[in-house]
């Protein structure tokens, strides 16, 4: 570029850091589309002038769904595509490839920071590799550093660690900090935990020390799947002492492993499964000093809510900001009144969730206490609460006075979910109970609540000035009784003027088909809510998609 052209350019555009910020906004920040939207524009900018070239390329190459783009950087004579007997194309690579052929791939490989599909459910388009492609790349590269020396995060399927585990050896360098291992299908007993242990516990810079990994996650396509703890996996976890984020919700931790994790000084996010008996053994062992001193976010899958409460009573957990409890089985009794009494000491929480798997209608409320005003009472001291999510398939029995107290206690509330799919049971909460929520919770965006919309529809003419909530976008009404769709739609429009989604809750996924109610009265309620949805949608001039086809 000539000196005259450079002088005509704004001096801010000559600062690489600012260019990077600009270029990051050119492409869509997603790992679920490939190529990422905006990539062609950024590629054009990369060849516009020399100053733009490197910053644009670094943004373009930061994320790859697979190694295919790098393989395509090899000389054309070194790779080709062949049809397989199953009619799919397979990428082959020449075994005659030389180390000098890797120069272009190595240049771009140094820019890659993130590799792999972001989740088991997101399968980005990529070529199928011949089984020898990765071994050839590893054996013929002949470079003193890995193919991706600056790689920091990897999403890798667990099968890549089987047998020779060539793929992890090729891509994992000294700068790896975050790893997500994805598992397709149902759990088995023959996962290659031994190879995972050997790979992660030997750093390229120091074979006797583990990688300096700060985030480790295992993600399974089957959300409710479980597998038994394996000694090699537990060894890996306990050896990664620099962990800040650990998510292994499908394998049950032992009390010994939990004890080790409680001493990790940098651990801020923890998502694990611990059975009640292991929690009690951990408590009986005695905590090693201050338990989980840096922990701010805890997700726990367990079969024993009472044991979970005992755990949270231990010294430590002072910095806990977010708590999510997931119910494992229907066999144990869950007394939420007692649990909320226990966790009153954690009133600095801003997010509290208790959930369980979707159950058939006939099992509703099994071994679970209902949600009442007594249940909510201990939580009213959580003045910073922004999210309360209770979905354990139980009954919600609160009234308008309770809703008013909740609204006044939680002015920062953004999400309130009190799931209740009961039918034929009268609820004491009515539409009038929503008025204090709208007035006090001006940041409320999502609401899940069963109310009696068939009676006590407030008249705004009598109420006078009512404070509307402009932030609410989604209202899941569960199985709320309703009688006058027009009046209900008018009420919701006046109280929540920007409400865009109203979802009735009679339909649920019972397998392959959606199941509708059988009771004539419940069918009438469902039809009325469809009319409410239609009225609100017509007001939006069809901009919003229908809630059900």
Image (cartoon, helix red, strand yellow):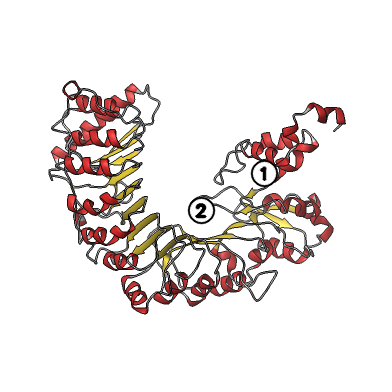
Residue at x-position 63% and y-position 40% = 24
Image vertical order of residue 336 relative to residue 473, above or below: below
Q: Nearer the viewer, residue 290 or 193?
A: 290
Measuring from the top left, give residue 39's x and y in whole percent: 65, 38
Residue at x-position 70% and y-position 61% = 133
In the picture, the quarter occupied by the C terminus is top left
Q: Quadrant of residue 500?
A: top left
**In-image side of 404 versus 261 (left or right):** left
Q: Earlier in the sequence, mark 1 or mark 2?
A: 1
Measuring from the top left, give residue 2's x and y in whole percent: 87, 31
Q: Which residue occupies the extreme bottom position in the image?
A: 285
Callout 1–callout 2 Cβ contact below 8 Å: no
Q: Quadrant of residue 146?
A: bottom right
Q: Quadrant of residue 547?
A: top left
Secondary structure under tag 1 reads helix
Image vertical order of residue 323 relative to residue 16, above or below: below
Secondary structure under tag 2 reads loop
Query: Which residue position is annotated with label 2?
Result: 119
Q: Which mark is residue 59?
A: 1
- Callout 1: few (<14), some (14-19), or many (20+) C-alpha neighbours within 10 Å? many
**In-image side of 468 versus 9 (left or right):** left
Q: Is residue 548 visible?
A: no
């Amino acid at each position: 570029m000539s000196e005259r052209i450079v002088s005509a350019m704004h001096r801010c555009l000559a600062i690489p850091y600012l260019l990077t910020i600009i270029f990051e906004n050119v492409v869509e920040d997603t790992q679920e589309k490939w190529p990422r939207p905006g990539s062609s524009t950024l590629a054009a900018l990369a060849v516009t002038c020399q100053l733009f070239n490197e910053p644009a390329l670094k943004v373009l190459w930061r994320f790859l769904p697979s190694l295919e783009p790098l393989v395509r950087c090899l000389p054309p004579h070194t790779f080709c595509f062949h049809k397989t007997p199953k009619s799919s194309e397979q990428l082959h690579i020449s075994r005659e490839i030389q180390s000098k052929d890797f120069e272009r791939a190595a240049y771009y490989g140094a820019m890659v920071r993130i590799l792999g599909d972001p989740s088991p459910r997101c399968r980005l388009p990529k070529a199928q590799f011949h089984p020898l492609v990765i071994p050839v790349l590893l054996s013929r590269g002949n470079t003193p550093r890995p193919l991706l020396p600056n790689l920091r995060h990897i999403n890798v399927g667990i099968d890549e660690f089987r047998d020779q585990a060539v793929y992890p050896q090729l891509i994992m360098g000294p700068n790896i900090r975050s790893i997500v291992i994805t598992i397709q299908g149902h759990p088995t007993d023959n996962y290659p935990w031994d190879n995972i242990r050997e790979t992660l516990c030997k750093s390229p810079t120091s074979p006797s020390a583990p990688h300096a990994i700060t985030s480790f996650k295992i993600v399974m396509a089957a959300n409710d799947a479980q597998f038994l703890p394996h000694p090699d996996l537990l060894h890996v976890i306990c050896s990664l002492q620099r962990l800040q984020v650990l998510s292994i919700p499908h394998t049950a931790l032992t009390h010994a492993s939990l004890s080790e994790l409680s001493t990790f000084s940098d651990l801020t996010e923890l998502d694990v499964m611990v059975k009640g008996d292991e929690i009690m053994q951990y408590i009986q062992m005695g905590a090693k000093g201050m338990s989980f001193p840096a922990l701010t976010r805890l997700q726990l899958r367990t079969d024993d809510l009472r044991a979970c409460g005992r755990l949270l009573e231990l010294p430590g957990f002072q910095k806990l900001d977010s708590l999510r409890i997931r119910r494992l089985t229907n066999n144990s009794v869950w007394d939420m009144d007692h649990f909320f009494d226990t966790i009153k000491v954690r009133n600095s929480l801003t997010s509290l969730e208790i959930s369980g798997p979707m159950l058939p209608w006939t099992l509703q409320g099994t071994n679970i206490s209902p949600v009442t005003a007594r249940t909510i009472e201990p939580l009213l001291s959580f003045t910073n609460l922004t999210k309360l999510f209770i979905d354990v398939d139980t009954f919600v029995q609160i009234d308008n006075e309770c809703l008013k107290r909740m609204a006044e206690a939680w002015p920062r509330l953004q999400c309130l979910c009190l799931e209740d799919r009961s039918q034929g049971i009268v609820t004491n909460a009515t539409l009038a109970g929503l008025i204090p929520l709208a007035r006090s919770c001006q940041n409320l965006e999502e609401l899940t609540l069963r109310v009696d919309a068939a009676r006590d529809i407030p008249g705004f003419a009598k109420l006078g000035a009512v404070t509307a909530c402009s932030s609410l976008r989604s209202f899941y009404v569960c199985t709320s009784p309703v009688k006058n769709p027009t009046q209900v739609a008018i009420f919701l429009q006046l109280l929540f003027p920007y409400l865009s989604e109203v979802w009735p809750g009679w339909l649920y996924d019972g397998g392959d088909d959606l199941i509708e109610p059988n009771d004539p009265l419940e069918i009438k309620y469902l039809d009325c809510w469809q009319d409410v949805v239609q009225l609100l949608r017509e007001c939006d001039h069809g901009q919003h998609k229908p809630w059900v086809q």
